[in-house]
Image: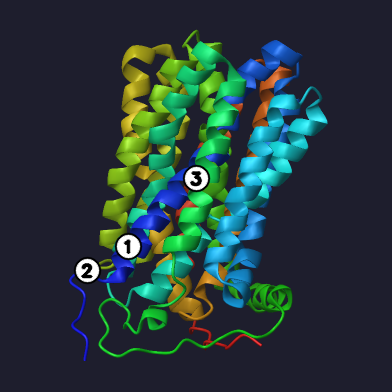
Amino acid sequence: MSPKPRLHYAYIVAALAFVLLIAAAGVRSSPTMLIQPLQREFHWTTATISAAIALNLLLFGLIGPFAAGVFERFGLRRTIAGALALMAVAAAGSIFMTQSWEFLLLWGAMVGVGAGSISLVAGATIVNRWFETNRGTVMGILTASNATGQLIFLPLFGLLITRAGWRAEVLFIAAVCAILAPLALLILREHPSDMNLAMLGATAVVQPARSTGNPFVNTIVALRDGLRTRDFWLLGGSFFICGASTNGLIGTHLVPACGDHGIPEVQAAGLLAAMGVFDLIGTTASGWLSDRYSARWLLFWYYGLRGLSLIYLPQAFGIASIGLPIFAVFYGLDWIATVPPTLKLTTNRFGRLRAPMMFGWIFTGHQLGASIIAFVAGVIRTNSGSYDTAFISSGILCIIAAVMVLFIGRTAPVPAAVPA
């Protein structure tokens, strides 16, 4: 009998997933730094650029549940490596673009599909495959990688754009994706049983149920079953508001909103990076809390406090030297702390086997909300010259979400079903 390794391979898989999610988050969020450079060079409107970002956000979520099906049928390694290669091609190709439809194709469609294949759905799949215990804590850490991606990349993007132009930024993105693709193929493993290991926290090696059906059909069947339950609508609806208030609004439009108030791009990117630091803390803590306390009540406080902070934001610009740092700390702690308790409620409701796919559809709601508000906020800014209406409206939606989540999990769980 071979001795047990000192370090369980689950930690290596989780560490690689953290890096991959960082990269995907950085690539997906980079168009927010391109808004002003593209306006200056090509004279495109905020609404035109926001349409591409909206498509990016929509596909980032919509691809998730289908990616979960593809993971089961064709494997994580090949899917993720292919997604990284697609993003590398899109980023490198964008140095030649001159028309807005090319930006829509490259950064809206291709990057959206690539990043959507390496989203939180991939993190949820890895957590449910490799970890028997402390799944909330690990998912909190992986979720925090979204903020860490902004922390690492956005200030760097700002410096690259300021000193070398936006084409240097997109070539850097292409290089990062090209380097990570072969690493995913070499290091990532599908299941603990592939290495004759038990899940971390378990004692027995378990052979996973293998999906042999059509991944597209399995994904649509999961959506059909979810739409028949009230909890799916509550989870998807609250996560819709989560996406609208984070990636769609603040993640996309805070930098140009700062520009409206005379705050330079690099300084505004630093504000997002500061949010990333505090979100790394807040989301990791949220994962720890979700292993121990009621997920419903955690979500109630997260959404309620987020709503109040967004309603406060227009006033924060009036005292930017003090108000914006306060907003960054408060909002950062709450940025995507909603993910671990949402995944916990999804797993409790639909079972571990179906949780990644169901969470993928719920995450689609998140990105649908992000997509809509990314476009609508751009239109509001173009027509009114201010983002204030978008900020306050999103704050009110968050307070509505705080009430919605209290009704999740009040019905009996759905028995786990094996994909066809």
Q: Quadrant of the N terminus?
A: bottom left
Marker disc for residue 179: 3
Residue positioned 65% across, 48% down in the render: 86
In the rendered image, which quarter is residue 200 located in? bottom left
Marker disc for residue 12: 1
Residue positioned 51% across, 79% down in the render: 350
* Residue 106 appears left or right of 299: right
Look at the picture and state if 103 lies above or below 60: above
Marker disc for residue 266: none
Q: Residues within 10 Å of mark 3 (few under 14, many from 20)?
A: few
Q: Which residue type does callout 2 highlight?
A: Leu
* Residue 28 appears left or right of 408: right
Q: Which residue type does callout 3 highlight?
A: Ile
Image spot of residue 99 (x, y percent)? 81, 25
Which residue does the numbered mark 2 point to in the structure image?
Answer: 7
Residue positioned 26% across, 60% down in the render: 289
Mark 1 vs mark 2, CA separation in Å: 8 Å
Look at the picture and state if 187 lies above or below 283: below
* Residue 137 appears left or right of 46: left
